[in-house]
Image (spheres, grey):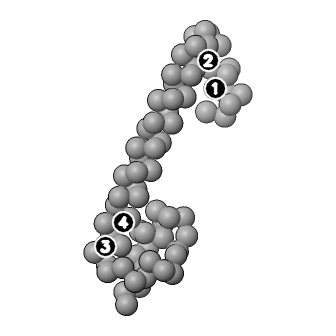
Amino acid sequence: MPKQDPALAQALGQAIPELDALSAADQKKLAADLNQAHKQHDAVLKKSMDDALSHIPFLLRGAVKKILGL
């Protein structure tokens, strides 16, 4: 049984022992798929936040972003 790929553990945020049953190639593919999903999710969240901020007058956006921690 292969040891869990470090990239997979990083993509998940922690090691999950049950995934040790996957082959090394499957672990690498899962890690790549998870990383891609995280990137897409981040892009959607950024677009949503930008769309939400577009309703705020331009001069106030900087202050609102600072308040929201963006």
* Residue contact between numbered discs 4 and 3, judged by CB atoms under 8 Å: yes
Of labels 4 and 1, earlier in sequence is 4
Q: Which residue does the numbered mark 4 point to in the structure image? A: 30
Q: Residue furthest left?
A: 25
The x, y position of residue 43, in whole percent, is 43, 38
Give the mark, 4 or 2, whose residue is nearer the N terminus: 4
Q: Residue at x 31, y 79 (%)?
A: 24
| Distance from the alpha carbon under mark 4 to that under mark 3 | 6 Å
Q: Quadrant of residue 8?
A: bottom left
The reply to whether dot 3 and dot 2 touch (C-beta < 8 Å) is no
Q: Where is residue 6, by image quadrant?
A: bottom left
Alpha carbon separation for disc pair 4 and 1: 34 Å
Q: Which labelled disc corresponds to residue 65?
A: 1
Residues at marks 3 and 1, CA–CA distance in whole angstroms: 40 Å
Look at label 1 and name its amino acid. Answer: Lys
Q: Are marks 2 and 1 in contact (CB under 8 Å)?
A: yes
Can you identify the residue that label 2 sits on?
Answer: 61
> Relative to the observer, which residue lies in front, 17 or 4?
17
Q: Secondary structure at mark 1?
A: helix
- Horizontal placement of 59 versus 38: left or right? right
The answer to which of marks 3 and 2 sits earlier in the sequence is: 3
